[in-house]
Amino acid sequence: MFLEKVFYRLLRKSWTVQWWFQRLFPQPGFLVCLLVVLAAGLDTNQTLAYQITAWLLAMLVVAIAGSRWVKIAVRVERVLPRFGSVGMPLKYQVIVHNSTNKVQKGLYFFENLQNPSPSFHGFRDHLHGFQKKAFTDILLAVRQWFWLIKRRELATIAAIAIPPIPPRGRTEITLTMEPTHRGFLHLQGYSLTCADPLGLFNRIQTKALPQSVWLLPQRYRVPPIALPGTRRYQSGGVAFASSVGDSEEFRALREYRAGDPLRKIHWKSWAKTGKPIVKEEQDEFFVRHALILDTFVNVPYSEKLEEAIAVAASFACEFETEEALLDLMFVGTEAYCFTSGRGVGNTEQILEILASVQPCRDKTFDFLCPVVMERASLLSGCICIFLEWDQSHKKLIQYLQKIQIPLMVYVLCDRPLMVAPEEQIFQPLQLGQIQQDLLPQ
Amino acid sequence: MKSLIIPPLYMGLSLLFWGWHTEQWLFAIPMAIAYEIHWLINSRWHFSDVNIRRAASIATVSLIGIYAFIAVTGSWLNALGIFFQWLPITLYPIVLLQTYGDTEKINFRSLLIFAKFDARIAQKKRNFNVKIPYFIICILSASGKPDSNFIFYILLTIISVIPLWQLRSSRFNIALWLCTIVLAANLGFVGQIGLRQLHYYTEQQVISWLGKFYQGQADPFQQSTFLGQIGEIKQSNAIAFRVQTKNHHQNQSVPRLFREAAYNKYQGGLWIATDNAFTTIKSNNKQDLWQWHEPTQIYDSVTVIDQTIKGKAIAKLPPGSFRIEQLPAQTVEVNQYGVIRLESKQKSLHYGVDFNRDMNHESPPTSADLEIPKTESSILQEIIQNHHLQGENPSESLANLETFFLKDFKYSLKLTEPGDRPTPIASFLLDQKQGHCEYFATATTLLLREMGIPSRYVVGYVVQEYNPWQKQYLVRDRHAHAWTVAYLEGQWQTVDTTPANWADLENEQAQEFTILSDWLSWAWLQIKLIFSNIFKNILTPENIQRWWWIILPILLLRLWFGTSGTKEKINRIILPQHRFNTRQKNVQMSKFVAIELAFNQLGFERHSAQPLQQWLRELQKNEITVLMVIELEPILQWHYRDRFDPQGLSPEELIEFQRAIEQWLQRWHR
């Protein structure tokens, strides 16, 4: 345990070292040269490489000393959009103001993201998912560490050179963010660097400028949602359904009959007439689809789940929310059902929710079944995105088929699935060729 | 990050620098010319990745080949130096391919001949410029030859000015940059002297520090002892040498003590061999049999497996040795104390020793063998008198002395303070009565001398640990021992007064995992033996020299035709213009440039892609430049017409335009 912690701390430190290294040394090649000649010049009797070492070291020392005299006096504003999408480069502006009477030249701009290192327990938890082999253990841990860092970083933003900023002037630079994974990306601040006269060592100025951006899941082109379901009576209605369809509009007032719900009593009219009067409303009939997302995996980071979320997001985008309601159902820490459409919520909100979905590791798929069954009577159609195809999944699908709800079922798989012909009620989506499987050419 | 560009003549210069310092002019001059000529010719050729991979294969194989050749025929350390010096030659084909190729860069993976290579991907990803690493390698290789003057450093600083100029920060002016360079050059000059001194100092320190742990070989001239020191002696468990008998059995024919050196003068904890005179021993024709005394009719033989340090060794010999067999050596010398010193090119030695334990071939005693330091004399006399050590004859005296040590003294590796006594020996004999072999041997030698018996101090090893599995005796560093030889009845006799249990005490202190380390050491020895046999019989330098020039071309041909990938024809391409001349020089300079330069001097620069109008609009927002820009409006209109209107400006308008610019400059730019 102690050794594991020490190892973890070392790995965690590696990110900080890399952070500093990128910002301090504008010429990494110079350091590589220094290390090579240092090794070659160890024996001063054999070669003169020690003279090269001394020369390079002297330059580095002068550069470090020289960088102390560099003064960076600029102010930075960032214009960041609210959303970005995985796989789509996100361009945004940064405005740099020069508050001095001198030109500011040779500046570089680095975005500072949150340290993506996982916690000790998170890292251990991730490693438990692998079969351990004694000798490759450390190698595996190191490799997985860097994989995790990349996974948790969510996006990469390359450093950019700032063009000379005139005295008391400003300049605009365009940065390109490359989102790699969905989630909530927090930009902590920025670093401005400026090299010493020799151009070998940077002066760094780091400032906080916290801002965030939602990185929405990747989207695929999906087939049209062809669920031949009928409109269903929505008991009690959705009071806010306003634009399209038969809304639960007020129709008339009538006298109270036994069995009318109390909340339909129109109190003002009762006060006027002296006897109970109720509101009569038109019944609600409209289309309501469910998007059922399977989140049950036993590892903290699953590519399958990521792809399932991407497919779910693609369907959510395709869905015309003016026409119908969409219930997004999945299980996180508890069972969730988010409704959107007809003025309630919108696609962006659904995508935001999908961007923050976490895998459910402590429950099984059976936990989701009752939630779906409970709402089944309201549903006109159902899109299911599953990570497995086993008995519990089959049971749910059979139930939905029994009550004649039109279905679109997708199952994510690592390799081609072998299923009996009578069971082929789903479309397998193989990792790596999801787009082809969704929309075959 | 700024990228370096190698300007014309610069690579040639670095090649000449390398050629000058390593005296490879013959290669450097043609290489420099062949490289630099590419600036003058318009032709380029299309080389496929297969060609580059072939060049890389040739470079790698040549590198390994050259290294292996020199390492086998000479010493590996020498080979490393030459390997460095030859690097620019072996890597040159790759640089040439890139230089005369139609692409500016090559794919990095094509250089790694053992890596997986996909030609289709490689074609797209030509992202590595070999010229810059090659330039650095030239400079590094130039340093491969040691030199005592400072011209190398001075030329190095001069040659690195151009890359440094390219890397410099645009924020600072040239004067400041120059000052920094000069400062760094001076600092580096002092630094390189310091590094040299530091290396020398560290080397000395490490040698003396290691000397404490590893006894190594004895010095035939003097031997310092631990007498008088405080603390605990820790001896290494490492195997010093091995002894084999003829039939590989544990038997009585192996003497217990193997000697290295003998000394006759003691002074303050130091044993010295005075008048040390080494004479060269003559050998047979094959230079592997060395005999320094006439052989006796009956003798025993053992085999010693030892190694040389920097080509030198002191032979470990049983008493009465007169001949060494199967020892390939340049010289073997013997001194009057029976010490054999040898020089051999071989690192591991495997020699047979013939000896007769009843004989002794040391020179007869001299007056030095009876000398006693004045500081010790009175105490020695006191002990001899108090314990009645002096017998009627030398043999009786010797017996008394052995009994004296056996009765009262015990063995200990813990060194304690001498107390009030003037010398460590006095403290050992009178107070402590415990110590290690150096105390016993020194005290015995001095006491014998005090009683009139000539004696010498001898150092060597005790051979006692038989390893039945390896079928040989293992002698470790901690088995190092000291004893006395006394001249009795016309012959030198071994006198060892150290308590017999000392070896057990040493064994108790032995480190753990001895078995594993012994086994590894033995396995390594076997591997070395097998290889040395191969080298001795098959891979002799002569054989290698004979066959190498046949093997190497075959290997290269195999690589040439074995390189995978689609083979493409090398097509010649004529460049439209010289690469360095691609900028259009004929574009007429706009008159508006003067105004732009004026702004630039004030620190307001325009991006290359920014339209002038947009730039001026931005300047209008700045309080410093707002007034300057307002007057520019009509001038900009003229400028646009001058540049883009197919009709252009009329001569009158042109004059007016010119005048407006001059007026503006007069007003705002003084």
Image (cartoon, coloured by chain):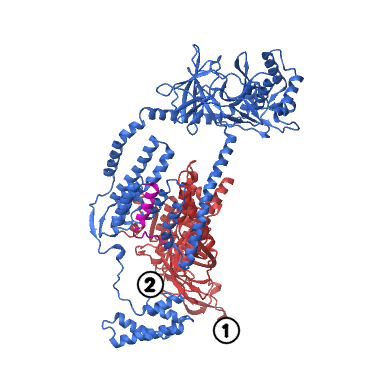
Chain colours: A red, B blue
Q: Position of residue B371 (x, y in %)?
A: 66, 24
The answer to which of B38 and A332 lies nearer the viewer is B38
Which one is in front, B76 or B372? B372
Q: Report the disc number at residue A272.
A: 1
The residue indicated by pointer 2 is B608
Q: Residues within 10 Å of mark 1 (few under 14, many from 20)?
A: few
Query: Which residue is rendered at x = 73% and y = 29% of the image?
Result: B427
Does residue B118 lie above or below B7 as drawn? Answer: above
Residue B502 is marked as none
Name the image quarter holding residue B478.
top right
Q: In this view of the protein, can residue B152 be seen by the observer?
A: yes
Instruction: Output the chain of dot 2.
Output: B
* x then y, percent, for residue B367: 63, 22
Name which quarter of the figure residue B319 lies in: top right
Q: Which residues are magenta?
A: B1-23
- Residue A274 sits above or below residue B470 on the image: below
Depth check, front residue: B595 or B485: B485
Say whether mark 2 and mark 1 are on the same chain.
no
Report how far apart the C-alphas of labels 1 and 2 lie in the structure.
Answer: 79 Å
Q: Residue at position x 76%, y 19% from top? A: B385
